[in-house]
Amino acid sequence: MSKEAPTLSLLANSPIRPSLQHLVQNHTLWTAPIIILLFALVVRWSIALNPYSGYNTPPMYGDYEAQRHWMEITLHLPFSKWYTYDLQWWGLDYPPLTAYHSWLCGLIGSKINPAWFALDESRGLESAESKLFMRSTVVLSELLIYIPAVFAFCQTLYGNAYFKKYTATVLILLQPALILIDHGHFQFNHLMLGFTLWAINCFFTSHFVAGAFFFCAALGFKQMALYYAPAVFAFLLGRCFTERAGCWLFIQLGLAVVFSLGLLFLPWLGSLQDLAQVVHRVFPVARGLYEDKVANVWCAINVVIKLRQILSLESTVRLSLLTTLLAILPTAVHLGLRPSRKRFLYALVNTSLSFYLFSFQVHEKSILLPLLPATLLVLEEPTATALFVNTAMFSMFPLLKREDLVLPYFITILLWNWLLTGFKWSQKNAIESFTTVAIYGLFLLWHLSEAFLEPPAVVTGLGLVTPLGVGVKTTWKNLLEGQCGIVSLGEGFESLPVRIAAKVPQGSLEHGQFTSSEWLDRGDDRVMAKFTQYAIAAARQALDDADWKPKDVQEKERTVQAWVV
């Protein structure tokens, strides 16, 4: 028993330990995997009962509609049109394995009810039955790929040390960020992460070629798996030098990669134009340096230095590429020279976090990639892992709040931290303890302020009155999802893009012009006073940050006001 006790004091108070001891005393330890699996499924289905991205927010809805739409187009259209069909309505922008998965889900769903995925006619469908099916596809996909990979990883790493094995399994499966994004927000990130974890399992058991197949599957499902590529490449290259038949292994790995990627892209290999369109959709350079307000270096620098105004798009691509390479190079070289299982996990954290901090076009959900290897190290680095998980969750709070996932946010964080520590922190390092408490205290203070204090208003975008600190793209997202009202005092903005104006829930769209008057009564003296206070400085800065450009000086000076509903 003593040899299985955790060596790290943070885990000493975990409630998982007495639960496992109870099973041992009753000779029912064999039920532990079943209990863990059922508990993990209950948590996922509980989160699935909450709203999702774009819930009841026409006309464009959100990521839920994007996933449903991909099932629709892959089911009804030939391969050549998958990446070209009506790109303004959630055009497919993930690699082919995502498309194949969408086709399979759409095929199964259409057998149940063809109306769920009728071409064009099913856009925005939110019937109770279709939502149940869509939620089921996420749960079943995770049950088939990600969850078995977690069990296999913990078995490979900890063997018969049942306390460590099952504790790690629980903490990995109940990591809150992935659950909230996939089962709340609605995505299939667990498939990319599951394929990656199967690759790790294969590497750890010296099945390197099989691991290469799985990693190519991860890349073929979501291009963000490239965050792991430097560590994977360095680890496998290092193994080619340390293995007895290293040269033959190198050839096998090369053939496995070429065969896997060739198989994934096979339907488009007959036309360079079609293949180029797939690559263009998968790597959308035109979107810009970063998306929304994400906790990476470029977004932080933008507060002081407006790189997107100073540098061209090509220059920002080169800058982000150079800084990312410089950040990952030491880790990759070290791992390649001294490949080992433990170094590989740490390298996965370092390289994926480097991509998150420095690479081009990062979304806040990209934090899920460094979170996977960090969570795999939960028994080795419990304090650091806990801090990482909680910080990642905090960074995604604005996204989750917009989608009415605040209650699941707090419940899943509390559940995971309780399972890790029992809310009894026993750290011997005073500096580490003080730092951890200080950071968590700041998180708590921010949440209390956000909940009970009314933030000052600030004008962003085209003069939109929003809470202080909300960025231009976040403002647009709130507007398009119906969380803001908008009114034009004067003539409409003639050069306001039709694609944007058509999404605005309030008002009307006529020939690309947005005109509305029904939100005038939303104003009051308090709001107008704040509008006047912040308008001049903030509106000019926000107009410079926005992608929209006025056609003339007069249009730039027109006033557009919005009030949070």
Image (cartoon, helix red, strand yellow):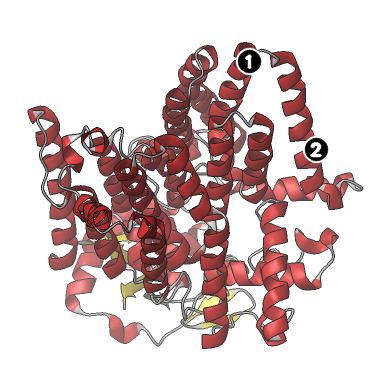
In the displayed structure, would residue 498 be above or below residue 334?
Answer: below
Location of residue 451 by image quarter: bottom left
Secondary structure at numbered mark 1: loop
Residue that carries the numbered disc 2 in the rendered image:
259
Q: Residue 217: give x, y in percent of width and height.
A: 66, 45
Q: Residue 248: give x, y in percent of width and height.
A: 76, 18
- Distance of mark 2 from mark 1, alpha carbons? 23 Å
Q: Residue at x 28, y 46 (%)?
A: 391
Camera-side mark, 2 or 1: 1
Q: Nearer the viewer, residue 334 or 323?
A: 334
Q: Residue at x 45, y 42 (%)?
A: 155
**Residue type of the residue flagged with mark 1:** Glu
Q: Nearer the viewer, residue 358 or 195?
A: 195
**Residue 299 at least partly seen:** no
Location of residue 37 by image quarter: bottom left
The answer to whether residue 249 is left or right of residue 265 is: left
Q: Nearer the viewer, residue 231 or 52?
A: 231
In the displayed structure, would residue 413 be above or below residue 509?
Answer: above
Label 2 or label 1, whichever comes before in sequence order:
1
Q: Residue at x 51, y 87 (%)?
A: 128
Residue ranking furthest to the right = 270
In the displayed structure, would residue 14 be above or below residue 59?
Answer: above
Q: Residue 63: give x, y in percent of width and height.
A: 53, 66
Q: Dot 2: few (<14), some (14–19), or many (≥20) neighbours within 10 Å?
A: some
Q: Dot 1: few (<14), some (14–19), or many (≥20) neighbours within 10 Å?
A: few
Q: Residue 149: give x, y in percent of width and height.
A: 52, 48
Q: Residue at x 41, y 28 (%)?
A: 346
Secondary structure at numbered mark 2: helix
Quarter of the image with the N terminus is top left
Q: Which mark is residue 243?
A: 1
